[in-house]
Image: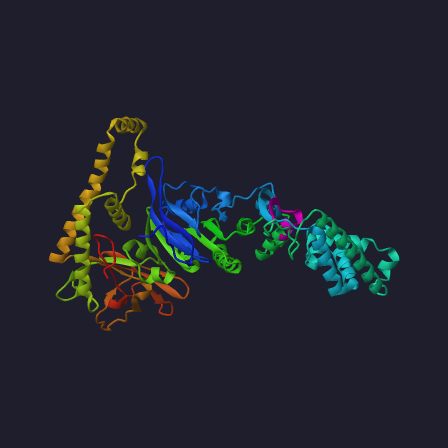
Amino acid sequence: MINENTQSEETFLSLRHLVKVYPNGEKAVYDFNLEIAKNEFIVIVGPSGCGKSTTLRMVAGLEDITDGNIYLGDELLNYKPCKDRHMAIVFQSYALYPQMNVYQNIAFPLVINSYSAPVVNQTLLSCAQVNELIECIGVEKVAKAFAEVTEKKPKFGEFTDDLAALLDIEYCSAKLLVKLYNSLDRESKRAIAEKADEILSAWKVKIAEAEQAEKVKLKAENVKLNENFHVLNEDGTEKSVMRKLTRYEIKTRVYETADKLDLTPYLDKLPKELSGGQMQRVALGRAIIKNVPIFLMDEPLSNLDAKLRLTMRSEIVKLHNRINATTIYVTHDQIEAMTMATRIVVMSRGFVQQIGSPEEIYNHPVNVFVAKFIGSPSMNMFEMDYDRQKNAFSYDGFDIPAEKGFKVKYETFYETKCREFEEINENFDETSREKILKILSVLGEHKQKAASAKKRNFIMRTIDFFKKLFEKKEKKEVDVWLKERTIAKEKLEELKSCIENGHKVLIGIRPERLEVEKAEEGKKYDNCYVIEPTLTELLGGEYNVHFEFCGRNMVGKLDAKYKLNSGDKIAVRFSAEDLYIFDPITGDVIK
């Protein structure tokens, strides 16, 4: 359990005991807990309807939280509107404005919002910047910059904007520089090389006069500035104001964002003129430009083709690393989760099944659901009898030896589980009920009520509605709990039987861990399962070889240099070190 009053010093975003219950009583998310460090890339993965998008929407503020808290540092976000949460979200649909071009779509968040900014004395700032610039590069290079901006196609659309971008100065400084340059007569502009010193001295005098006049004005008004020319309050803190960004500030940030995403050539195009990948990058750009610390992405690549999805996966990770963002990414694609995440959160039917690094999730799954969901092709699963005397798994005369020490693990596991279920049955409450529901979600036994209700005709649904309307609330609750209580008792009896008698266990093995070789005719194979494949899939450098074992379809991998023809057989060897042993009653791994 997480202590509500403490959190790790490294925690940046904290999701504590999040619960979501919809008005119809459907519980979409159960007790979601996650501590996220700064700059982490968190991927929430699971099948459709598992609650991953609902969780993301609660974090974003698009969905009300039924119970639990969300903290950004020490700040509680539960009741803050979306716009005040310092987050940006990218949706599954691009959600671009069709009537706006790429520039306008990216700029839109900056155009509609106001931002806190220091109050700057632009006169003194521009005088200081221009004074430093002309001393550093000289009048001749300033004239060359003017000529360069005049000759080239304007990047920002206006001369002053482009001059500010070229010389890396503020817009107000560029305006002052334009004023000084335009004060020169034609003869001075033509002979600027010969008159450079004279022009420089004249400009310095004008700048000094402007500075002096502004300082006198500020003194009379009793206004104080810091070294950055920011206006100070009476207590010495910087004075700030909520204001819209200037046109130049917006342009600068749009072009910086477009450069990061390689969108600069498309800024004047409409969304309908772009490819799927380009539209996805525009949607990303609209999120990035907000310059927020947290990015939320809800299956942003699901509408792209396979090749483009592969490219965009790497681009999103590169972008995440480049801007040092903290990202929460939702997907149903376990390959995306494995290749992109710092940590993965695996969900099923509202429950968090496991949280860990891609390596931990792949190599050490905690239950059957995680083991089967993560990995492509999926982990092979089959049932075998466990013989404690032999310490081996057997099926129809074929034995696989268990690793040394497994017998102790087996007995300890079932003794622990029996104690857990005895406690659940003795003190059955809402928490106990949710434990049973989680076990059912792991085993895939929990059925959604909504699906069956939809199949009924209108009359039957109307009758059911009035029946439920007149039922007592207490009786309804008892009926719901009775189902889970019965399951808990049945599970306890099954677990006790496992200690006293032998029983079947679920065994899993990754396709790449199966030792598969082409069987040669007449050669004897010891401790191998020799069979004819049911299907072979050539993937270029290797085969996916399908075969029957223990009544289940299995998949192994074989190097493509061993060509398989119709009628060929394969020899399959199992290593005890590569097996995952699961309890079929709870779905948990036996360890």
Asked whether 58 falls inside the magenta stretch, the response is no
Residue 108 placed where, x, y %? 58, 44
Asked whether 242 falls inside the magenta stretch, the response is yes
Q: Nearer the viewer, residue 1 or 521?
A: 1
Q: Nearer the viewer, residue 554 or 19?
A: 19
Asked if 56 appears above or below 195 in the picture, the reply is above
Asked if 469 appears above or below 205 in the picture, the reply is above
Residue 15 placed where, x, y %? 39, 50
Residue at x-position 79% and y-position 62%? 139
Q: Is residue 148 left or right of residue 387?
A: right
Per the rendered image, the range of residues in magenta is 239-252
Location of the C terminus by quadrant is bottom left
* Residue 297 seen in the current view: yes
Q: How is the image coloured?
A: rainbow
The outermost residue toward the left is 500
Residue at x-position 83% and y-position 59%? 202
Among the 4 quarters of the image, the one containing residue 549: bottom left
